[in-house]
């Protein structure tokens, strides 16, 4: 029987389950640049060019190995015809008797594919995605009978299950988590290594041209383009991270420096999420660097925790809570997304810098996303729908399974504390401590109220006051109300007035 194996834009691994046991004579592999997930979101131009180039390279590789590939390039025709109809035509043209896919990473796509069985009257086999280190089923089982889900405990189990950084079943040197050591701000003369930059071949140049043509009104700069687009290049990127950056990854994980978008982060999420790299090979590379004394434990453990812990935990939450997770709005936030999230025009230097880097690079590191862009969205009360839309558009690593829990759960507390135990709300002091943005800002970080005051300073208290009913009982943030209650009424009025004036002026 002829089988159609569908490869989506984030399935670019030779070891993907949908390619297991392919019959090179009988089976067809369908790849499309016009999948629902590619077209339904107005992705950053760099992300589209990256995925298109990576898909074309991957398809070339499969062709060389002798597979039958049906490849849909981006075109007006393919953008106009529903994905299902294109699959239907292939089934008829090639007399296909079965479809095999790896479980789609987005809930909506999974639903669509599951529906094909009834529509085409052929079996659809959905295989587990073995690239993840915890299955959806295992994660669900882990959550059973737990009052609270905490990433730290999940992470410890994952360390044990996969025998990572263990010594006789216990964590090496006796400690599971070195997060406390990972909060330094770089002193003078840090020499941050240059990030990986690929040479663009003709396939990539063509992908850039097509993106500019078909997605010309999308957000973001496409040039310069420097992403890895093949497995070999992605492996080079991993190797460069291990030799150049990993040793300082932990120390400066939370630091933000104006003009230094890449810091000591790995920049591997793009490749992990589309399949050019596998999580376990990144974890093993970091673990080996520790054993070879090439990187300290706080850096290696911190990096491994992000991949083995956070990344897997976030995916587990997505599949546990979808489809309702998308509608979560625990704090009833209703504000529109301010225009500066798109054009970067704001006097708040931290936000200006982070949006500008996002537009240029389709990348911002975790703390910029969490403590600047996310924190503002939280304390300004922006509707989760708009915040999710923005985060899914602007980053080259954004796929709904990872974007949504980070936004709805981690930054907006829109799930009421299911993913995280408290909202990551903060005034300007945190940004000032971990960055040098405030030195170049129109606003004064030290001023609490009035037109020159840092807006984060009063918006933070206004956020707490507005959401008192829902947050006062939270045992990690509730104590802030004791401080708020000690403010004189005059100060409380100033907080409220400044916040209203500022928020009303947002466009
Ligand atoms: C509001 C918000 C939105 C985010 N949206 C995305 C997204 O769309 N796609 C995405 O991959 N990550 C997202 N993250 C998580 C994290 O910010 C990015 O994974 C990270 O910045 C990618 O850069 P890096 O590869 O240099 O990461 P590093 O700092 O070098 O970390 C190493 C790896 O750990 C993983 N990781 C770290 N933190 C997380 C996390 N919270 N969730 C999942 N994986 C994590 C990533 O795979 C990353 O490549 C988001 C975080 C926040 C706060
Ligand atoms: S003063 Fe406030 S708005 Fe300005 S950069 Fe610092 S934290 Fe951001």
Image (tube, rainbow, N blue to C red):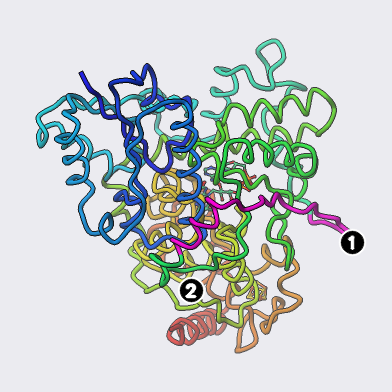
Which of the 4 image quadrants contains residue 238?
top right
Pick the quarter of the image with the C terminus: bottom left
Q: Which one is nearer the viewer's eye here, 24 or 467?
A: 24
Report, in whole angstroms, how far the alpha carbon at label 1 lies from the one at label 2.
Answer: 32 Å
Q: Is residue 151 above or below residue 193?
A: above
Residue range highlighted in magenta: 185-211
Q: Which one is nearer the viewer's eye here, 446 or 55?
A: 55
Q: Which mark is residue 342?
A: 2
Is residue 141 part of the magenta span, yes or no? no
Q: Which residue is mark 1?
A: 188
Pick the quarter of the image with the N terminus: top left
Q: In the rendered view, does 136 fall on the left or right side of 160?
A: left
Which of the 4 image quadrants contains residue 122?
top left
Q: Position of residue 504 (x, y in %)?
A: 43, 85
Residue at figure coordinates x 69%, y 76% from the top left: 445
Residue at figure coordinates x 70%, y 49% from the top left: 196
């Amino acid at each position: 029987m002829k089988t159609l194996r569908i490869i989506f834009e984030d399935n670019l691994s030779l070891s993907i389950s949908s390619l297991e046991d392919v019959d090179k004579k009988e089976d067809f592999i369908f790849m499309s640049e016009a999948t629902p997930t590619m077209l339904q979101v107005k992705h950053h131009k760099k992300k589209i060019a990256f995925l298109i180039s990576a898909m074309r390279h991957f398809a070339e590789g499969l062709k060389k190995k002798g597979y039958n590939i049906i490849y849909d390039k981006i075109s007006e025709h393919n953008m106009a015809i529903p994905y299902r109809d294109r699959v239907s035509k292939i089934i008829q043209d090639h007399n296909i008797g079965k479809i095999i896919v790896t479980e789609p990473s987005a809930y909506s796509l999974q639903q669509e594919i599951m529906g094909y069985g009834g529509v085409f009257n052929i079996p659809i086999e959905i295989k587990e995605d073995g690239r993840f280190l915890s299955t959806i089923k295992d994660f669900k089982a882990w959550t059973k009978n737990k009052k609270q889900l905490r990433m730290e405990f999940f992470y410890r189990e994952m360390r044990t299950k996969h025998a990572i950084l263990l010594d006789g079943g216990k964590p090496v040197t006796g400690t599971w988590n070195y997060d406390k050591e990972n909060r330094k701000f770089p002193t003078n003369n840090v020499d941050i290594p240059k990030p990986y930059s690929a040479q663009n071949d003709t396939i990539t140049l063509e992908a850039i041209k097509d993106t500019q043509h078909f997605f010309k009104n999308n957000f973001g700069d496409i040039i310069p383009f420097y992403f890895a687009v093949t497995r070999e290049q992605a492996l080079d990127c991993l190797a460069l991270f291990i030799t150049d950056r990993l040793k300082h990854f932990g120390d400066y994980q939370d630091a933000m420096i104006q003009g230094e978008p890449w810091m000591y982060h790995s920049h591997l999420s793009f490749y992990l999420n589309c399949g050019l790299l596998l999580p376990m090979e990144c974890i093993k590379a970091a673990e080996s660097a520790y054993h070879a004394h090439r990187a300290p434990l706080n850096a290696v453990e911190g990096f491994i925790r992000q991949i083995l812990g956070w990344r897997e935990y976030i995916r587990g939450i997505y599949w546990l809570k979808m489809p309702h997770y998308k509608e979560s709005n625990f704090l009833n936030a209703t504000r529109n997304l301010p225009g500066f999230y798109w054009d970067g025009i704001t006097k708040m230097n931290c936000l200006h810098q982070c949006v500008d880097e996002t537009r240029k690079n389709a990348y911002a590191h975790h703390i910029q996303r969490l403590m600047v862009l996310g924190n503002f969205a939280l304390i300004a009360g922006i509707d989760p729908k708009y915040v999710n839309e923005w985060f899914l558009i602007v980053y080259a690593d954004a796929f709904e399974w990872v974007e949504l829990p980070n936004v709805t759960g981690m930054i907006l507390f829109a799930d009421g504390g299911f993913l995280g135990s408290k909202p990551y709300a903060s005034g300007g002091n945190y940004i000032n401590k971990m960055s040098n943005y405030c030195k170049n800002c129109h606003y004064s970080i030290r001023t609490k109220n009035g037109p020159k005051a840092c807006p984060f300073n009063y918006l933070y208290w206004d956020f707490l006051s507005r959401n008192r009913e829902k947050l006062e009982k939270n045992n990690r943030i509730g104590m802030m109300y004791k401080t708020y209650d000690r403010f004189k009424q005059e100060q409380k009025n100033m907080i409220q007035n400044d916040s209203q004036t500022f928020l009303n002026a947002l466009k």
